[in-house]
Amino acid sequence: IELAQATLKENYLDIDAHWAILTAANTLKDTELSAHHLYMVKGILDSIVKSGDGRSEATAFVVISVSEEYAMLRAFKLR
């Protein structure tokens, strides 16, 4: 959790760091911490999905980093 929190201090929109804390919080049964990071993960993914439909270059999904693109693909089980 500490490493992911340090990452979030540098980039609060790092979805992988939010996911790591969410996973750890679930394991620790910390529902408050889990709920916050689930909210962030869902918010970031929702913003990507609402940015386009991904069917063409003109309607591509908009991401702010390559890691965000891969996170979205993992979330939707795409390759």
Image (tube, rainbow, N blue to C red):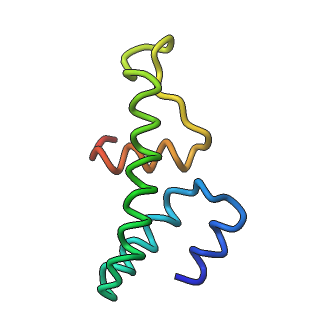
| Residue situated furthest right in the rendering | 10
| Residue situated furthest front in the rendering | 32
Q: How many marks?
A: 0
Q: Is residue 34 above or below residue 65?
A: below
Residue 2 coordinates in the image, percent (x, y): 58, 83
User: Would you say 45 lies left or right of 17 here?
Assistant: left
Task: Looking at the picture, tell me which residue is in the foreground, 48 or 33.
Answer: 33
Q: Is residue 61 above or below residue 59?
A: below
Q: Is residue 27 above or below residue 20?
A: below
Residue visible at 33% across and 50% down in the picture: 75
| Residue situated furthest bottom in the rendering | 28
| Residue situated furthest top in the rendering | 58
User: Would you say 76 lies left or right of 72 here?
Assistant: left
Task: Looking at the picture, tell me which residue is in the foreground, 71 or 6.
Answer: 6
Residue visible at 45% across and 15% down in the picture: 59
Residue 22 coordinates in the image, percent (x, y): 39, 71
Residue 28 coordinates in the image, percent (x, y): 34, 88
Q: Is residue 76 above or below residue 18?
A: above
User: Would you say 60 lies left or right of 42 here?
Assistant: right
| The C terminus - image quarter | top left
User: Would you say 14 lies left or right of 73 here?
Assistant: right
Residue visible at 53% across and 29% down in the picture: 62
Residue visible at 49% across and 61% down in the picture: 16
Q: Quadrant of residue 23?
A: bottom left
Residue 15 coordinates in the image, percent (x, y): 50, 56
